Amino acid sequence: MPTLSQFAAVPNMLTMLRLFVLPFLVIQILDGNWRTAFVLLWIAGLSDFFDGLFARWLKQHTTLGQYLDPIADKLLMSTLFLVLTHEGIIPRYVTVLVFSRDLGILLISTLLYITNILRDFRPSWLGKTSTAVQILTLLVVMTAQVWPCWPLAMLQRGLLLGVAWLAPLSAAQYAWITLRRVQSGGGGGSNSPAVAAEV
């Protein structure tokens, strides 16, 4: 599919909607309009769900989508962690651990990719778990701001602790798996985005 036509693909338009919603979501959080922010978060989440669904239904798997979708997801999550930390809702140490993990994986993967040592970057099971827990944590944190209650507060604390533990553990597992693959010469070629699958 020609590059310009890829922008008109339904999945990619939904992904771009997620990017469009992001600044307005940030503004609503900073202004303390939690209900509006919660609605915008659900719009972003549904766009993420449906872009994958339409990509399969319409068979519109594009190179642009391969790069754009994970970038939009990571940008949304990273921005929310930063903004919610700025608002004093997520502890700073949690966000530091999350960003340290992502930055470390990004630097290592990029270095291996550009030096042609390794090009096929596969997510580890701990990496997938870490990402899933981060998403759930953000949903619970935002929900707790709209409907504050004791069970949500306890769940939020537990999830934040889980994020803090999983971030360095998943980074260590990823580094170990990558090191073993490099030593065994299992680089291989890949057309998928270099880093996106893990971070």
Image: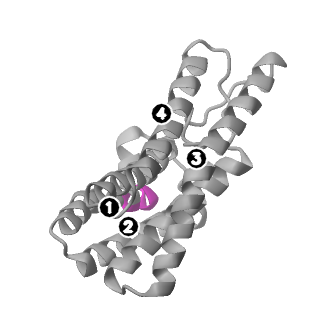
Marks 4 and 2, the one that precedes in the sequence = 2
Q: Between marks 4 and 2, how big is the CA–CA gap?
A: 24 Å
The magenta stretch spans residue 170: no
Considering the numbered disc 3 on the image, is that residue within a helix, a strand or a loop?
helix
Q: Are marks 3 and 1 in contact (CB under 8 Å)?
A: no
Position above or below: 35 against 30: below
For the point 46% across and 78% down, the residue is: 153
Q: Between marks 3 and 1, how big is the CA–CA gap?
A: 28 Å
Marks 2 and 1, the one that precedes in the sequence = 1
Q: Position of residue 175 (x, y in %)?
A: 68, 30
For the point 44% across and 48% down, the residue is: 93
Marks 3 and 1, the one that precedes in the sequence = 1
Q: Between marks 3 and 2, how big is the CA–CA gap?
A: 23 Å
Kind of residue at disc 2: Ala
Q: Which residues are magenta?
A: 9-14
Residue at the spot of label 2 = 44
Residue at the spot of label 1 = 17
Choose between 6 and 145: the one closer to the eye: 145
Q: Are marks 2 and 1 in contact (CB under 8 Å)?
A: yes
Q: Position of residue 140 (x, y in %)?
A: 46, 74
Q: If the image is split into quadrants, where does the C terminus sit?
A: top right
The magenta stretch spans residue 11: yes
Position above or below: 171 against 20: above
In the displayed structure, does residue 189 sit left or right of residue 99?
right
For the point 45% across and 53% down, the residue is: 73
In front: label 4 or label 3: 3
Residue at the spot of label 3 = 167
In the displayed structure, does residue 100 sit left or right of residue 148?
right
Considering the numbered disc 1 on the image, is that residue within a helix, a strand or a loop?
helix
